[in-house]
Image (cartoon, grey):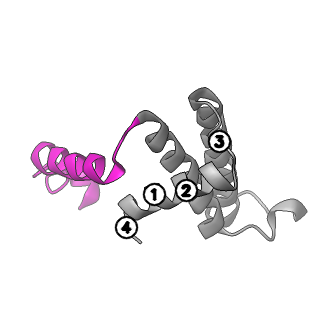
């Protein structure tokens, strides 16, 4: 699935099953919640915190997909093509960071 197709599919789902989009500020809050859930799982899986019983059956892929879903909703609501935005972001990074990371002694 392409990013463009994902945006279309999410839009179709929202307009049929989901009835309508939550407003942009509500979705921003939901995005923060989903990022928090992903963070909680990452900290327990790769960090020093132990798992709570309620976290044991959570999957990284599912938490990442939740974040992506809400980000796509926000993009759809604000008229952002994530494909175009990502392409422009690559261009920016390729210019700005052409040698930056190669010259970073911390990464050697």
Residue 5, image x, y percentages: 41, 63
> Quick one: label 2 or label 4, which is nearer the N terminus?
4
Residue hosting label 3: 20
Q: CA distance from mark 4 to mark 1?
A: 10 Å
Q: Nearer the viewer, mark 2 or mark 4?
A: 2
Q: Nearer the viewer, residue 83 or 102?
A: 83
Determine whether the residue tagged by mark 2 lies in a helix, strand or loop: helix
Residue hosting label 1: 8
Q: Main secondary structure of the magenta part?
A: helix
Residue at the extreme front:
16
Q: CA distance from mark 3 to mark 4?
A: 23 Å
Q: CA distance from mark 2 to mark 4?
A: 15 Å
In reply to whether residue 90 is colored magenta, the answer given is: yes
Residues marked 2 and 1 touching at CB (< 8 Å): yes
Residue 27, image x, y percentages: 61, 36
Range drawn in magenta: 79-108
Determine whether the residue tagged by mark 1 lies in a helix, strand or loop: helix
Determine whether the residue tagged by mark 4 lies in a helix, strand or loop: loop
Residue 59, image x, y percentages: 69, 69
Give neighbour class at mark 3: few <14, some 14-19, many 20+ (Cα, 10 Å). Answer: few
At horizontal 20% and vertical 46% (from top left) the residue drawn is 88
Residue hosting label 2: 12
> Quick one: label 4 or label 1, which is nearer the N terminus?
4
Residue hosting label 4: 2
Q: Nearer the viewer, residue 23 or 108?
A: 23
> Quick one: label 3 or label 1, which is nearer the N terminus?
1
- 83, above or below 33, in the image: below
Give neighbour class at mark 4: few <14, some 14-19, many 20+ (Cα, 10 Å). Answer: few
Task: Say whether residue 52 is visible.
Answer: no
Determine whether the residue tagged by mark 3 lies in a helix, strand or loop: loop
Quadrant for the N terminus in the image: bottom left
Residue at the extreme right:
53
């Amino acid at each position: 699935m392409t990013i463009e197709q994902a945006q279309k599919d999410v839009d179709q789902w929202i307009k049929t099953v989901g009835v309508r989009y939550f407003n942009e500020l509500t979705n921003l809050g939901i995005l923060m919640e989903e990022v928090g859930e992903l963070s909680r799982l990452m900290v327990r899986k790769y960090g020093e915190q132990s798992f709570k019983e309620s976290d044991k059956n959570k999957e990284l892929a599912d938490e990442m997909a939740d974040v992506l879903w809400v980000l796509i909703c926000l993009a759809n609501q604000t008229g952002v093509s994530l494909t175009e935005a990502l392409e422009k972001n690559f261009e920016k990074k390729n210019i700005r960071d052409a040698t930056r990371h190669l010259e970073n002694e911390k990464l050697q």
